[in-house]
Image: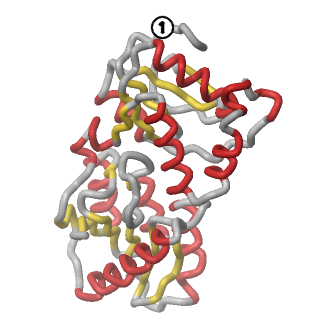
Amino acid sequence: MRGESLAATGALIAGTGALPALLAAAAPGWRICEMEGFPSTVPGAEPLRFRVERLVPFLDALLDGGVKQVCFAGAMQRPRLEPEFFDARTAALVPRLIGALQAGDDATLRAVIELFEEWGFEVVGADTLAPDLVPGEGLLCGALTKGDEADATRAAAIVAALGAVDVGQGAVVAEGLCLATEALPGTDAMLDFAAAHRARLIRTPKSGVFFKAPKPGQDRRIDLPAIGPQTVAKAAAAGLAGIVFEAGGVLLLDRAATIAAAEDAGLFLWGRAP
């Protein structure tokens, strides 16, 4: 890849989900890059694809193309490394890469940021490219009860504890009881679990909250938590009263559609002060 002309001063390392397309629209001159096996949803893009096993040639190609800033967006799973694909320079990073991949998500992502910074790139967050995606404090729709506020407080404490050991960014609490917490399978799996089990645990037909927040001390330039219309649909299916997120710390994907979906489902959306 070395010597390939990128003709862009920024590179978007795009994964799956809605976020990459939103950021590509906000930064139309940026080059779209994809890790093999994890195609993005950026319409019309001709991405530069790379493998972790050939990370150094990929970084060199970005440098040679004049790239100065890099932004990571979208979901990616940890790849299975294939020894036969390693080039010599990337192979020298194997102990570091393996150690990072075996750590928690936040530790892994910090290691990724460090590598890109060592090559001289400025790593910027999604909120730098599209600050309007990060709502502040306040109720976006619906109404809160004292019980909802209490559930949100309980969920926030749980998420802070989970984040402190680099596990997850979300929890579901109803009537003070923790129904589910987010782990490696992700938000959708957590909400599906809550939907499957709440009937035998909670008597009130519509109660409880899903709370989402960054991990304590998380580097917010990468893996900033996000919610969107699908999150609303999953929360509604779980019988929840609303969704609570840390104000200034969560991406709201497709704001108008997410609010409309919450209103249609009778859910509140609340940006809670940290």
Q: Residue at x 42, y 25 (%)?
A: 11
**Residue 235: % across, % down:** 44, 67
Could you tell me if residue 73 is visible in this image? yes
Q: Is residue 34 left or right of residue 146?
A: right
Q: Is residue 29 above or below residue 105?
A: above
Outermost residue, right side: 84
Question: In the picture, which quadrant includes the C terminus?
Answer: bottom left
Q: Residue at x 45, y 68 (%)?
A: 170
Q: Position of residue 139 (x, y in %)?
A: 19, 66
Dividing the picture into quarters, in which one does residue 43 lie? top left
Q: How many marks?
A: 1
Q: Nearer the viewer, residue 258 or 18?
A: 18
Q: Is residue 208 visible?
A: no
Residue 273, placed above or below residue 218? below
* Residue appearing at x 30%, y 82% in the figure: 148
Q: Position of residue 182 (x, y in %)?
A: 53, 68
Q: Position of residue 28 (x, y in %)?
A: 32, 21
Q: Residue at x 60, y 14 (%)?
A: 1
Q: Is residue 104 left or right of residue 95?
A: left
* Near-viewer residue (228 or 132): 132
Residue 197 falls left or right of residue 70: right
127 lies above or below 58? below
Describe residue 236's horizontal placement relative to residue 27 as left or right. Answer: right
Extreme-left residue of the structure = 138
What kind of element bears circle 1? loop
The residue beneath circle 1 is 5
Disc 1 residue type? Ser
Image quadrant in which you'd find residue 38: top right
